[in-house]
Image: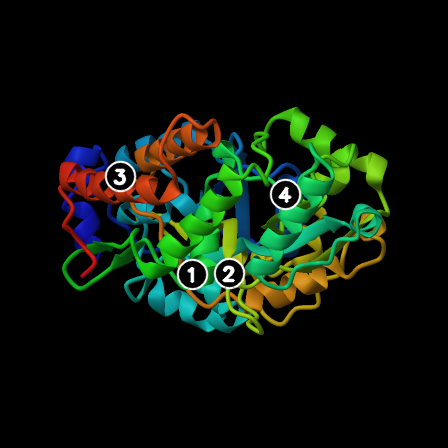
């Protein structure tokens, strides 16, 4: 299926003719050097630990800016010139755009597959080909202000229908107070809700991509949130505006249905409410279900010109299964079956709840893979702009936005020279 991405390389300006070559057996006297690009603050300490313990495989870490467009462009520019690293941290949204630069390491990576959750493994394995190893993931749960829930007589919702009932109750009885938010600058939440409902907007077939943004699951999710938006039962405060944390601190917003990476951010930025919060499974679309979804995360991809893919994967697996080390850096490991202890400051903020234990359960309950297309960048902007207009009341609703995005998605594939068809 890699040919499907290469077919659009000219339009995307992402062509690659890189080749790999072999190397000799590494030793302390003649060590292999692995070049690794990533953006997690503090990563150098873990790399130093590896280098001290493995003199035969030395890793040269190059920190990049935090997973933004500049980093993506730097990676692709270097790869086209044949100057890319052996290993690169790739946001989950980038994987399908970068695999034309990545090496097929299906055979070499196979021995590590059991170390990772099924959902995380799906993010590095596209159409049966594996290109690296998962680093961290973003299983979703519900973080909520238990103190305020008690004050307002709210129940923790187990279904999205109950969520809507509680959202109506708190805002109706306490104007200006919201159960949760729905914001334009966090549009990937919408995709996670669709994933949890069993939908899949983009998938790869034998000869083309399939675009399915108008599935029953997608429409159900869009109509659900549109009703809350129209009735002003959810806050439209931007997720990445400082006001968001102010509203968590002062009790204007009472919960966040969000990924693992939200836990330390909420704890670090809503300190006035420390000890008041708790955590619960995300509300379910079907009563009695236990389905989660992914929101965010990253992978370590082995690039095409890596001379020592086996050694690169050996380091990547050591790093990505270093649970305590990754937790110290604020990452939620994508490992399977590991005991993941909640860091002390997060444990304290959430009133002693086993936050990371629940997140580990949620990670195991991600049932479907969510692929981002290689044309995602422009589509993401269009989605955010559309949601901004909807929450401001100046545009049609979410169902209509999905119709617009369905066509825009098909158009973007055509412009990139990649085969794509609408779902039947």
The residue beneath circle 4 is 180
**Is label 3 in contact with label 2 (beta carbons under 8 Å)?**
no
The residue beneath circle 3 is 404
- Element under disc 2: helix
Query: How far, Cα to Cα, is label 1 from label 4?
Result: 46 Å
Left or right of 329: which side holds 374?
left
Q: Nearer the viewer, mark 4 or mark 2?
A: 4
N-terminal label among 4 and 2: 4
Residue beneath the point at 73% across and 41% down: 173
**Is label 3 in contact with label 1 (beta carbons under 8 Å)?**
no
The residue beneath circle 1 is 310
**Is label 2 in contact with label 1 (beta carbons under 8 Å)?**
yes
Report which quarter residue 340 is drawn in. bottom right
Q: Which mark is residue 314?
A: 2
Front position in the image: 224 or 147? 224
- Element under disc 3: helix
């Amino acid at each position: 299926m890699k040919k499907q991405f290469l077919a659009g390389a000219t339009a995307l300006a992402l062509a690659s003719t890189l080749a790999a070559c072999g190397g000799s057996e590494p030793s302390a006297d003649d060590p292999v050097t692995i070049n690794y690009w990533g953006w997690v603050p503090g990563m150098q300490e873990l790399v130093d630990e590896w280098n001290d313990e493995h003199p035969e495989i030395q890793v040269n870490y190059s920190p990049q800016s935090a997973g933004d467009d500049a980093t993506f462009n730097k990676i692709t520019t270097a790869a086209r010139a044949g100057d890319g690293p052996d290993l690169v941290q790739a946001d989950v949204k980038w994987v399908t755009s970068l695999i034309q630069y990545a090496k097929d390491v299906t055979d070499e990576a196979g021995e590590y597959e059991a170390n990772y959750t099924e959902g995380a493994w799906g993010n590095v394995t596209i159409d049966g080909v594996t290109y690296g190893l998962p680093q961290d993931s973003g299983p979703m749960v519900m973080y909520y202000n238990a103190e305020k829930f008690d004050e307002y007589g709210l129940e923790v919702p187990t279904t999205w229908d109950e969520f809507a009932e509680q959202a109506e109750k708190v805002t109706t009885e306490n104007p200006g107070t919201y159960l949760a938010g729905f914001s334009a600058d966090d549009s990937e939440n919408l995709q996670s809700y669709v994933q949890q409902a069993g939908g899949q907007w983009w998938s790869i077939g034998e000869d083309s991509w399939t675009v399915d943004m108008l599935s029953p699951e997608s429409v159900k999710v869009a109509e659900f949130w549109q009703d809350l938006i129209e009735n002003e039962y959810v806050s439209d405060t931007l997720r990445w505006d400082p006001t968001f944390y102010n509203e968590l601190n002062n009790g204007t917003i009472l919960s966040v249905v969000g990924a693992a990476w939200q836990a330390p951010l909420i704890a670090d930025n809503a300190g006035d409410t420390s000890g008041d919060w708790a955590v619960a499974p995300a509300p379910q679309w079907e009563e009695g279900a236990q389905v989660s979804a992914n929101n965010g995360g990253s992978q370590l991809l082995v690039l095409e010109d890596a001379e020592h893919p086996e050694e690169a994967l050996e380091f990547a697996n050591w790093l990505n299964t270093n649970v305590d080390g990754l937790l110290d850096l604020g990452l939620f490991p994508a490992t399977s079956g590991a005991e993941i202890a909640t860091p002390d400051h997060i444990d304290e903020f959430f009133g002693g709840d086993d936050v990371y234990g629940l997140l580990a359960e949620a990670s195991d309950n991600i049932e479907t893979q969510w692929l981002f297309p290689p044309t995602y960048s422009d589509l993401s902007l269009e989605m955010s702009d559309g949601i901004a207009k909807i929450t401001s009341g100046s545009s049609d609703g979410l169902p209509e936005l999905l119709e617009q995005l369905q066509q825009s998605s098909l158009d973007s594939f055509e412009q990139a020279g990649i085969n794509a068809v609408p779902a039947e």
